[in-house]
Image: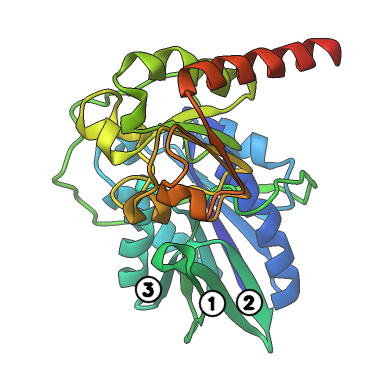
Amino acid sequence: MRDVIVYIEHVGGQPRRVSFEMSTKAKELATALGGKLHAVVLGTGASAAADAMKAYPFDLIHVSEDAEIDAFAVDPSVDYLEAAAKAVGPALVMVPYTMIGRDLGSRLAARLDCGQNADVTDIVIKDGKVGCVSPKLGGTIVTTCAFKGDYGVVAIRPNSFKAVPSAGAGEIAQLAKPAGKTYRVKIEEVVLEAAGELAVEEASTVVSGGRGVGGPEPFKTILKDLADSLGGSVGASRAAVDAGWIGHGHQVGQTGKSISPNLYFAVGISGAIQHKVGMRTSATIIAINKDGTVPIGEFADLLIVGDLFEIVPELTKQIRASAAVHA
């Protein structure tokens, strides 16, 4: 493989942060492979998203706003991305490790008859081969898997790379509609949960609550206040989600989302292995719990033992006071 293709996930023309993060890393990879860097942007608002991506080092940005892309489930996007990949030739295709990206990436790998590596936190080039670095077993081991063949699909965990704008040629190319395609699974309605809030996989700071917070109210008050003071998002353990205290979209863990924020607060969370799997690779982990023997204390960078209902509001107060002084 020579070229690198990045699938740009966006919402109404606004690229998700992981798209910018992948783009920066992709340029490094394309240079190392001696190829070009491509982007594929699909659906309503694709042209606006493509304009935003011109601030990043793409040689060519492939675009389609075909109405069928948003009218039907993921198949039209797979068709367009497959067509772009085959037109480019042997390439590494990067998709985000999100709900949409995972679905799209696995289907594309089947279409291209190539390997796929998922939940990847780094990519290295050695002797012309692409190696994908991925934590396994809750981060207790780290694997590096190489691709064989002309194509490879890699799903990138959000917050794995730093987004650094650097404009390239940014030539726009309209993708032709794949011929002879019909679709059966139509999208009747899109329901946006917690609209306007930063998703946990997008946030550089996540404040998560568990069974220890005692109910739904702290998620709306003290946890959200702390997250807002740091420009972050509110997460949750499975126990809190199963109790109905907060929506599944906030769940961090094996059956939720795997995230790698710069700063992770685990408030009232014991740290069972299922939760650990989803946040172990966070850069800094701070646990707040009344029990000093909870499992999360074994791998947290800092364990604060005490009443979370006193500690969290006071911490928020101090952060806001500090921000005001330096404003």
Label placed on residue 112: 3
- Measure the alpha-carbon separation of dots 1 and 3: 10 Å
The residue lying at 71 percent from left, 48 percent from top is 170
Q: Nearer the viewer, residue 279 or 231?
A: 279
Q: Position of residue 215 (x, y in %)?
A: 29, 19
At mark 2, the secondary structure is loop
Q: Position of residue 47 (x, y in %)?
A: 56, 34
- Decide: few, some or many residues near mark 1? Use Cα within 10 Å; few <14, some 14-19, many ≥20: some
Q: Earlier in the sequence, mark 1 or mark 3?
A: 1
Amino acid under label 2? Answer: Arg
Label placed on residue 2: 2
Q: Earlier in the sequence, mark 2 or mark 3?
A: 2
The residue lying at 69 percent from left, 68 percent from top is 30
- Decide: few, some or many residues near mark 3? Use Cα within 10 Å; few <14, some 14-19, many ≥20: some
Left or right of residue 256: residue 183? left
Which image quarter holds the C terminus?
Answer: top right
Placement of 241 over or under 83, stated as above or below: above
Q: Are marks 2 and 1 in contact (CB under 8 Å)?
A: yes
Placement of 91 over or under 149, stated as above or below: above
- Measure the alpha-carbon separation of dots 2 and 3: 16 Å
The residue carrying mark 1 is: 90
Amino acid under label 3? Answer: Leu
Q: Position of residue 313 (x, y in %)?
A: 56, 15
Amino acid under label 1? Answer: Pro
